[in-house]
Image (spheres, rainbow, N blue to C red):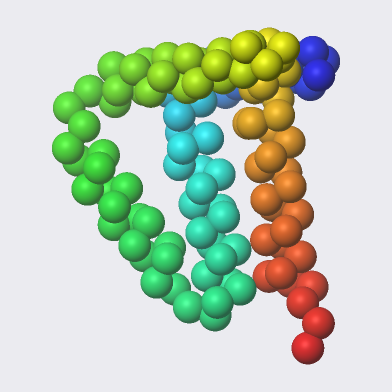
Amino acid sequence: MEALFKVVYDFLKFLEKLTGFTYEEINIIIWYIVIPFTWVLLLDKILGKHYLKATFLLILALFLIYIPDFELFALWLFNVSVDFLNLFNHLGSSYKISSVIVCVLIPMVMYFILIRKAYFRTK
């Protein structure tokens, strides 16, 4: 788990340098925008509609328009997310282990399920 956490952390730090966004902004963009949007794309594929992605993009656009300072917002949401992950410490976990489970393993399971339903459903 530690090694996987480090790989993800190093990748996010690379993206930080590449894009000029802060580490916190990169986290929010990936885990609160990119990943959910890809799930919405897959759900639309499963449903054979375009409503979810259109709705997601509209809500996202409105949301981004009304955020006066994305960097400050991202820092706040990142800290709230860290606090959430630290709640699992009471169950014997750690921030790094909880991060890998919640932010990597659970999304991978979701991708597996959604991709399977979107592209490999039996007729």
Q: Position of residue 4 (x, y in %)?
A: 79, 21
Q: Position of residue 30 (x, y in %)?
A: 52, 35
In the displayed orientation, state which residue is furthest to the front: 91
Residue 59 relative to residue 44: left or right: left
Image quarter for residue 12? top right
Q: Please state, as top left, top right, bottom left or bottom right, where the C terminus lies in the image.
A: bottom right
> Residue at image x 29%, y 57%?
58
> Residue at image x 67%, y 21%?
98
| Residue 69 visible within the image | yes
Image quarter for residue 42? bottom right
> Residue at image x 75%, y 54%?
112
In the displayed orientation, state which residue is furthest to the bottom: 123
| Residue 96 visible within the image | no
Residue closer to the observer: 122 or 89: 89
Residue 107 relative to residue 63: left or right: right
Q: Please state, as top left, top right, bottom left or bottom right, where the N terminus lies in the image.
A: top right
Placement of 15 over or under 64, stated as above or below:
above
> Residue at image x 58%, y 72%?
45
Q: Where is residue 69 in the image (x, y as percent from the top left)?
A: 22, 23
Residue 71 relative to residue 14: left or right: left
How many marks are shown on the rendered structure?
A: 0
Image quarter for residue 17? top right
Residue 9 relative to residue 16: left or right: right
Residue closer to the observer: 91 or 68: 91
